[in-house]
Amino acid sequence: MRTLAALSLVLVVATACRSAQGGAGGAGSGAAARNATPAEVTPARVALGDSLFNNGGCMRCHGQKGVGAQNGPALNDNTWDQLTTGSFEEIRALIVSGVPKEKIKVTTRPNAMGARGGRMNLNDEQITAVAAYVWTLSHQ
């Protein structure tokens, strides 16, 4: 009986702390949800995305570790040249669709961003991995 009472107390305290910090159902839960790590952003996906990004075509335009380069914006500073929110979903969608030359907002950048990683022709899991990695660059 004491064990059950102790477990109940722990559950009540944990729920109260979660609500006070803006967890599910608590005040500020909208902000907590916006800042929460998306389920797709796992350590394994981030590692794969890091490898694909930094050893593939992505880093040629966006620089090693996403610091920016002549043809692509920095991805680690929350300025988001081509995005509105920098959400995981938005990052993933942009990788899937690419950015045609006429839609690039910074006109001094000479090349389009190819869909699905351009010549890399990333599959769905690889796109999710690169999006997970890019998301972490500005959400650490």
Image (cartoon, grey):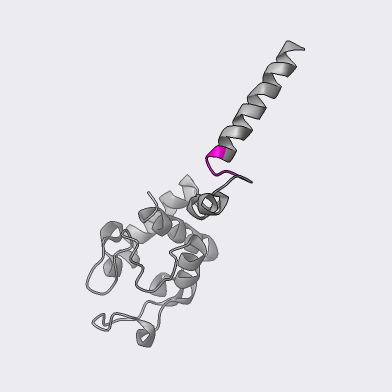
Where 90 falls versus 42 (above or below)?
A: below
Residue at 63% across, 34% down: 15
Where 105 falls versus 74 (above or below)?
A: below
- Residue 131: image location, x then y, percent: 45, 61
Pick out the residue farthest to the bottom: 102
- Residue 38: image location, x then y, percent: 53, 53
Q: Is residue 23 shown in magenta?
A: yes
Quadrant of the rendering where the N terminus is positioned? top right
- Residue 86: image location, x then y, percent: 43, 64
Tell me how many marks there are.
0
114 sits to left or right of 39: left
Over which residues does the magenta segment extend? 20-24
Pick out the residue farthest to the top: 2
Residue at 51% across, 55% down: 34
Q: Is residue 65 shown in magenta?
A: no
Q: Quadrant of residue 112?
A: bottom left
Residue at 54% across, 65% down: 124
Where 3 falls versus 27 (above or below)?
A: above
25 sits to left or right of 33: right
4 sits to left or right of 51: right
Pick out the residue farthest to the right: 1
Decide which of 75, 13 is in the foreground and name it.
13
- Residue 40: image location, x then y, percent: 54, 54
Pick out the residue farthest to the front: 27
Decide which of 34, 115 is in the foreground and name it.
34
Where 79 falls versus 102 (above or below)?
A: above
8 sits to left or right of 129: right
